[in-house]
Amino acid sequence: MIPDKVPQEDVYHAPQDLVKGAHVPNFEKYKELYLKSIQSPEEFWGDIAKDFFWKTKHTGKFLDYNFDVTKGNIYIQCMEGATTNICYNALDWNIHQRNLGDKVAFYWEGNEPGDELKVTYRELLHQVCKFANVLKSVGVRKGDRVSIYMPMVVELVVAMLACARIGAVHSIVFAGFSAESLFERIMDSQCSLLITADGFYRGDKLISLKLIADDALQRCRDKGVPVEKCIMLKHLSKEQPDSPAASPSPPAKRPCPDLQVPWNPEVDLCWHTLVDGASEECEPEWCASEDPLFILYTSGSTGKPKGVLHTVSGYMLYAATTFKLVFDYQPDDVYWCTADIGWITGHSYITYGPLTNGATSVLFEGLPTYPDMSRMWEIVDKYQVTKFYTAPTAIRLLMKYGSAPVQKFRRDSLKVLGTVGEPINPEAWQWYYSVVGEKKCPVVDTFWQTETGGHVLTPLPAATPMKPGSATFPFFGVVPAILNESGEELEGPSEGYLVFKQPWPGIMRTVYGNHQRFEATYFQKFPGYYVTGDGCRRDQDGYFWITGRIDDMLNVSGHLLSTAEVESALVEHPAVSEAAVVGRPHPVKGESLYCFVTLIDGVAYSTTLETELKQQVREKIGAIATPDYMQNAPGLPKTRSGKIMRRVLRKIARNERDLGDVSTLADSSVIDQLFNNRCPTAV
Ligand code: PRX
């Protein structure tokens, strides 16, 4: 399945100095290790597991599983009998076994230039132990779910590791999500505690996080399911007189006079006060391999988010190994992933992957464009970043401003560049490679999902000749296939559904509280395979190219959204009777949201209503889901059985007149009307 030979021409190779000393220095070595990972997983992963601490060793098979719904329940079980703790491995083990106590774990860079902080492994361990004791003191026990809704601060990492240390299950909700989204996720995961912060700045914009959190908590109370406690970190208001000096963050440079922090003494607790008296010692909870580690919600095609559940041992090995090999991690690296920890990229490649390797990372609170277009490169120079990981949407955004903001800084520390989240168009790849990396840094285009836990298709920087826009080949232990509509495996150059034939240690184990949905979503369509929901093409050289989602999902700025989720937010408005949402290509975001709304009789379409509807979606889901285009659709193109023909709507959104076969349309007169009503800004 991995080609014997890969082309040596019209591909990009790593420079010789990167190849020297690389963990996987050439394609031959990659193939050899890949075969071993598939044929002898026990031996392959067993060797890797030796670098970790196990309280007890595993007794069963390395991976036991059923991937075929026709043969019974789907399950994946890794390292049965082993007990460990991922927080212990990330901190204590590095400090005691590898002597990394004084090594910097994070350089924190705030939204404002000059707002900065350095945390060593030892300091991080102390903070984590203190907070783990705080969690215990407020009644959190092994297996309890804890919601975390925080900005990109060190305390976010502290909170997640503290949960992991005591065996509690964290459910991090991205701090850009709305009160409604937070409420929905708290309810679904039945959390007893919410951890949040007063607020933060994103560029110039103040986000009053506690206000949003309070709104979500009120909704829980209204449903009769109150969350017992809410711990609030003073991030912006930490300069206020009642703030204890123990705050680990530096003073905020920007004053926040308008920040209102409501306080409910029945529920609210102050992070700093709690931490102040807590002990710096906390024995870890030894967890079984398949104990839950975290839940992370991802969009589902029904509109209801799915709580993707990852478990301890398999996720730990996979996040650590992909980090080490895909970025060719070396001990003197300074690594920077620009994602938010609220997404899986931040879980695996800001917290767990780097820390289990004892790496030094940059943790950035701000925006790539604030205060100016050079911010990223200024940070790269400031910390001498060697490995840099970002999203195609950020690359396309910066590309618009040309090479000058990049070339203001040297960037000569950079060795490997990475991308994640969506297909990278070859033009953006070239710009990243040539302008940012000055043709000296391989670009690893990493394909993966919240569900996969870590990279599944990816180049290895020294080993894989790169083709711009291709995620190249599978990572160790991963067996991809391309299926046609009838579920037949296609060989050679082909295009179809991307599936995986067997599990790898980091794959999700279930949808929290709904195993049936897990089976139905990923395993029902093609029994025997995990279905990614992505389309894929394999070229004549065996390279994989992701062609994008083939379900009702959209990828906006690297974030998955389901059309159903946005539609249901729109129809909740009293003026709307029906809504249909499709994607329209966007030069920076990849895809943008184009919404067709049918109003109830007697309501007139107006720009005021349009603004209200956009606001409604922001409030229901969050700013990432804000519709870009909206139009009045007195009628939608439907089949006689009433199914909306989205294919036709996609064409209308793009203003493409060639609609293909529309013979199944119940009423073809709606087409002209829809073209006439097109959103004028969607040229
Ligand atoms: O469509 C694929 C796209 O992002 C989806 C997964 O989204 P999410 O679970 O939010 O995780 C994003 C970060 C891992 C995939 O189904 N995707 C992710 N990486 C790539 C990609 N599409 C093409 N190329 C990639 N490198």
Image: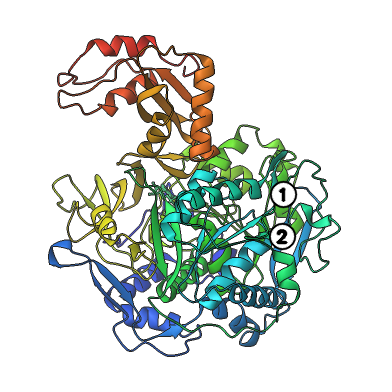
Location of mark 2 (residue):
108
Q: Nearer the viewer, residue 425 or 81?
A: 81
Amino acid at the residue labelled 1: Val
Q: Is residue 542 above or below residue 89?
A: above
Helix, strand or loop for disc 2: strand
Asked if the residue at tag 2 contacts the one at tag 1, i.e. Cβ–Cβ closer than 8 Å, the answer is no
Pick the front one: 435 or 280: 280
Q: Residue at x 74, y 47 (%)?
A: 409
- Residue 261, disc: 1
Res 193 quadrant in image: bottom right
Question: In the picture shown, does residue 542 fall above or below 505?
Answer: above
**CA distance separating discs 1 and 2:** 25 Å
**Marker count (numbered):** 2
Give, as a three-letter code, the residue at label 2.
Answer: Trp
Q: Which disc number belongs to residue 432? A: none
Eye-nearest disc, 1 or 2: 1
- Residue 123's x, y, as percent? 72, 75
Residue 275 visible (yes or no): yes
User: Residue 70: horizontal and vertical position, in percent?
Assistant: 13, 62
Q: Name the spot of residue 572 as percent of width and height, x first.
A: 41, 31
What SS does tag 1 mark? loop
- In the rendered image of this protein, does residue 551 appear above or below residue 109? above
Dot 1: few (<14), some (14–19), or many (≥20) neighbours within 10 Å? some
